[in-house]
Each structure stands twice: as C-alpha cells, then as structure tokens.
Amino acid sequence: MVKINTFLCPSDANPGSTGTRTLNGVTLSIPAGNYPNSMGNLRRFNNPGWVPTGPAYYPGWDDRIRDAQAFQDAADGLANTVIFSEWVKGPGSTSQDGLGMVYGNNFTDTFGGLAQDANFNRNASATCQKATARVFGNKGEFWALHDPTRGGAFCMANTPNLKACYYRDGGSDADASNLPDDGDAVDTMIGASSQHPGGVNCLFMDGSVKFIKNSINQNTWLALASVDGGETISADAY
C-alpha cells in the first residue's frame, strides 16, 4: 500500500486511480505504478496447462501458473527477452478515451481458440483496435497486484501504444456480459504504452534498457516477448 515514486513515470502526469482501500480497519491510498512486467505474447494465462511465454510469473492464487524462471531458462538469450516495459495509467473512470483506457465490446474472439502464432495475434490485435466500449479506467492502479490492468502484468500481443482490450475465450459463462468482471477477462490484450513520442522503454533481462518504436515489426515484438520461442532476432530489427 506504499506509494513508490520509482515505480511512477515522470512523463505520465496523470495520478491514476486516487481511491482508497481499508485493510484491517486502516484506510490507505491506492498506490499506482507505470511499469508492468511481461507475461509474454499470449493473451491468456489462466487456463489449465496454459503457461506464459514471457519471463514474468503470476504470484497469486492460481497454482496452474509456473513458478518464477531463472536466467538459464531464457533460451532465447537475456538480451533478446523483454521483462519490463511501461503503460499509461488509467484516468480513474471510463469517461474518456486514450491509452490509459481498457476497451471491450462484450464480444468473443473467433481466432482459433487459444492459438498463439503470429497470425492469431495479428488478427486479435486488429479486432481489439475496433473496440469502442470503455470498460475499465483504473489501469495500473495497484503496483503490488500482478493481474493485468490493475497491477504488474502486461501482454505483448499488441505492439506499443495500441488500444488495450479485454477479451473472453468464447465460452458462454454467466459473466459473459459483465466485462470487466467476466470470469474469463484475464484473457487480455493490454500492452505497453507511454506518453513518450514514438514508442516505449523496455527493460531486457540482461539489464539493458532500450527505446522500442511503435513501428517495430509485430513478429519481432512477439519474439522479444518469449523466453524460449527459438526465434532469430536480427541485431538491427529494433
């Protein structure tokens, strides 16, 4: 519940969610953050056996998610794997459009279930950009929570500074019309964004920080998201 200025980007002047939470009778401010860590290039990570492709892990209640990875698990190379980037915090309401907003139209995807190839991500990303319904305005509200939108996890299915979206897996559950409280809403395409002109900063697993342009080839971006995808990334690709 502590506000840590190091976790806040000076270029994002918006304070984000300014609410409070009461824990054990003590009311404290909600501490926002701008620096999420990468779950990889899949939109989903709460399905049994569905393991994230990125270096981050989910330290929450879901025992179906793998444990933290070691450096030696990054077969693609530490210098070729993004672990942190940034996002624009939500405005605290759904009253305005922008990079801080998370969208959804209560639609399901039709891109082949849980496929993870580049064409799947490209199609899903294109559909995401057509969404118009504002469904969540508190992105980044809790740096200490690891779920997408609220805390520390982001997905690299979208290239930088594109519209962020909630997705469902296509099932007909009781929550299907209640985004963002849909039980499948962890199906997410909430990516990296910033107020910096032309791109975002990324921290790689070797400790280097690079500025990645919005124009990066999507296949290259997807390759930088995985720890052991076996992709070959040219030194001048980004």
Image (tube, rainbow, N blue to C red):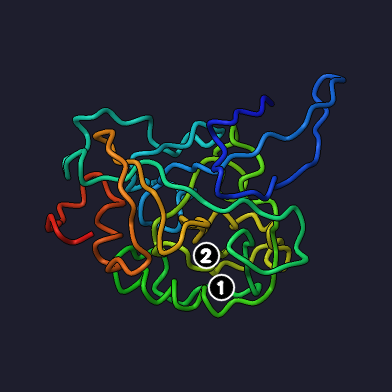
Give the mark nearer the N terminus: 1 vs 2: 1
Going by the image, does 125 lie left or right of 212?
A: right
Q: Position of residue 50 (x, y in %)?
A: 39, 49
In terms of depth relative to the viewer, which is nearer, 16 or 223? 16
| Count of marks placed on residues | 2
Q: In which quarter of the image is the C terminus?
A: bottom left
Q: How far apart are marks 1 and 2 (CA)?
A: 6 Å
Q: In this view, does 173 lie to the left or right of 226?
A: right
| Left or right position of 23 against 222 | right
Residue drawn 44% across the image and 58% down it = 43
Q: In this view, does 110 lie to the left or right of 66?
A: right
Q: Is residue 76 above or below residue 101?
A: above
Q: Which amino acid lies under the numbered mark 2 shown in the image of this protein?
A: Asp
Residue in the image at 81% along x and 35% along y: 20
Judging by the rendered image, the residue that carries numbered circle 1 is 108
Question: Is residue 72 visible to us here?
Answer: yes
Q: At 30% from the left edge and 66% from the top edge, which residue is drawn?
A: 216
Q: Are marks 1 and 2 in contact (CB under 8 Å)?
A: yes
**Amino acid type at mark 1:** Thr
Nearer to the camera, 96 or 225: 96
Which residue has dot 2 on it? 169
Label 2 packing within 10 angstroms: few (<14), some (14-19), many (20+): many
Q: Is mark 2 on a helix, strand or loop?
A: loop
- SS label for mark 1: loop
Split into 4 quadrants, where in the image is the N terminus? Answer: top right
User: Residue at point 59% right, 39% down?
Assistant: 33
Crowding at mark 1 (Cα within 10 Å: few <14, some 14-19, many 20+): some
In the image, residue 212 lies at what x, y percent?
33, 56
